[in-house]
Image (cartoon, rainbow, N blue to C red):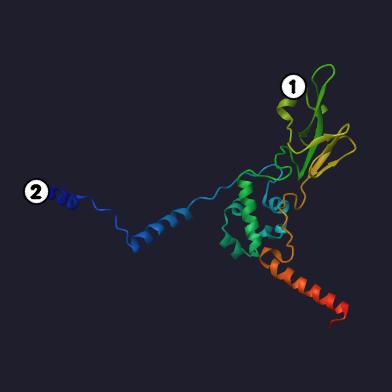
Amino acid sequence: MKSARLPSFLGLVLRPRAAPTTPFAASGLLAQSRWSHSKTEPVIPKPIPLVPDVKTFLTVIGRDMKQHVQKFPTWEALFSLTSEQLRELGVEPPRSRRYLLRMRKRFVDGVFGPGGDLKYVENGVATLDVQEVDLNEVDRDRSVVNVPPGKRVKDIPEAERKKVLFKPQDYKIKGVRGITGPYAIRKSRGIALVTVTEGMWEQKRGHKVDGGERRRDMVRFKKRVAERKALKEKQGYY
């Protein structure tokens, strides 16, 4: 019996020991993990034709964020500052910082607002024109295209149109040559202009009804009490 127990005892003694799991070791690993996470380089996206700089980005996201344009000297600073650094720079109130960080994340992920896919923009203005292609003797395809500044579809040779012209997603044709879409203003020559406008990408804040979810029951209870009291006063009970 003793010889049978000996191997198992030796196995327990000679078994490799696991790493210590003391609170100190655990906290050290956690600190190291947090340090490595804090050293992660932020993702700096490339500007797009409609939003080429800091001022334009803060303008299109709205909520009066353009008042902070002087706090961001470069495009890299806009997309790399942390929430704590934004607070130190004076981006207040906290909901403004949260909004800026959320819109920053959307831009990094390639989620743009109206006009975000336009290819040709000059001084904040993009030109849209109508391209017509004959499919056969009867049918004709018409589509909205973004043309280079100062150009019309007719000014571009047919052999180059497929390479030069760009079809944005949010703009359609209405009527004979009418172009409709977000912030598109039709001109007399059959073209439309899309101009950078403050708040064109803004996410509107919700409107609280009866004090919002946390205070709704209390506010409505007080309203019912006031209505009953007013009714009794009208009936002469007070």
Q: Position of residue 211 (x, y in %)?
A: 72, 66
SS under mark 1: helix
Q: Is 75 on the left-hand or right-hand side of 122?
A: left
Q: Residue at x 76, y 34 (%)?
A: 148
Tell me what residue is drawn at x 51 percent, y 50 percent: 41
Q: Quadrant of the C terminus?
A: bottom right
Q: Residue at x 36, y 59 (%)?
A: 26
Q: CA distance from mark 2 to mark 1?
A: 93 Å
Count residues near mark 1 (Cα–Cα under 10 Å), then give few for <14, some for 14-19, many for 20+. Answer: few
Is 217 rendered above or below residue 2? below
Disc 1 target residue: 159
Percent across and percent down for residue 35 are 44, 57
In this rendered view, identify the residue nearer to me: 52 or 99: 99
Query: Callout 2 environment at 10 Å: few (<14), some (14 to 19), or many (20+)?
Result: few
Query: Residue 200, relative to residue 20: is it above or below?
Result: above
- Residue 57 is situated, as x and y percent measured from the top left of the image, at 69, 51
Q: Which residue is mark 2?
A: 3
Q: Quadrant of residue 21?
A: bottom left
Q: Residue flagged by tag 1: what amino acid is it?
A: Ala
Mark closest to the chain's N terminus, 2 or 1: 2
Residue 121's disc number: none
Of 102 and 130, the residue lying toward us:
102
Whether residue 48 sits left or right of residue 198 in the image: it is left
Percent x, y of residue 166: 73, 32
